[in-house]
Image (cartoon, rainbow, N blue to C red):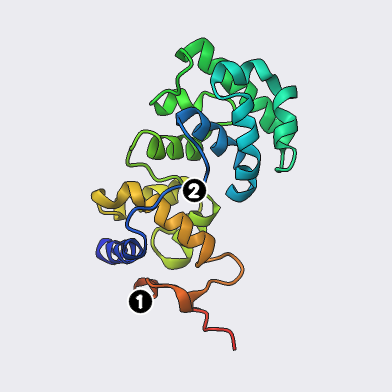
Amino acid sequence: MSRDQAAAFLRTLATANPKPETELLYRDPFSLLVAVVLSAQTTDAAVNKCTPSLFAAAPTPAAMAALGAEGIGPHIRRIGLWQGKARNVAALASLLVEQHGGEVPRDRAALEALPGVGRKTANVVLNVAFGENTMAVDTHIFRLGNRTGLAPGKTPRTVEDGLVKRCPPELLRDAHHWLILHGRYVCKARLPACWRCIAATHCNYRDKVVPPA
């Protein structure tokens, strides 16, 4: 897509959801960070079923570190890879206490140095918790960027860079939410619901799907 076409695509999505928000349940930067770490290869809905009891038991990094992996585990058993995630959450909580005064850092390098935190997770935290203009590329946005022609690329970073270049600056922070929600509910992996896509006229996907009979 050209920049003008990409802008039109995003502005069309914006008309349906002017104030998009993450679907993860959180109450502060720490709970957001933990929720995003837990959401790796797991749906937000599944994470949201686990985190209320976890955050009630350990609302702060110090409390989470004290809970430890063995205490975290029972709260998150229903999600995928829960054992490794329990270890990562316990370890990152300890590092927040030891190195950052119990606060989530507003710094990409510091975030990515935490266990279980990669570029995508850091981008989500910077975007949602701190209002930064970042683009977190998950599987939905990676698929959508390639399928629609919005920002083709072989790696998440290539897609991220393409999206940042094509997205009008004033739309960049919200664009992450518009795209992930669109990929999750409309431009789905197995069968994109093109007939429900309000931005279909701006999309370069050649094999648009017609309504089921």
Q: Nearer the viewer, mark 2 or mark 1?
A: 1
* Picture mark count: 2
SS for dot 2: helix
Considering only vertical position in the picture, is 212 above or below 30? below
Q: Where in the figure is residue 27, as x and y percent of width and height?
A: 47, 34
Mark 2 = which residue?
Answer: 156
Measuring 61% from the left and 36% from the top, which residue is drawn there?
Answer: 52
Considering only vertical position in the picture, is 136 above or below 205? above
Disc 2 marks a residue whose amino acid type is Pro
Q: Earlier in the sequence, mark 2 or mark 1?
A: 2
Q: Where in the figure is residue 65, as x and y percent of width and height?
A: 62, 17
Q: Nearer the viewer, residue 114 or 48?
A: 48
Measuring 43% from the left and 57% from the top, which residue is drawn there?
Answer: 179
Disc 1 marks a residue whose amino acid type is Thr
Image quadrant assignment for residue 85:
top right
Q: Is residue 23 left or right of residue 202?
A: right
Q: Residues within 10 Å of mark 1 (few under 14, many from 20)?
A: few
Q: Are marks 2 and 1 in contact (CB under 8 Å)?
A: no
Q: CA distance from mark 2 to mark 1?
A: 25 Å
Mark 1 = which residue?
Answer: 201
Considering only vertical position in the picture, is 122 above or below 152? above
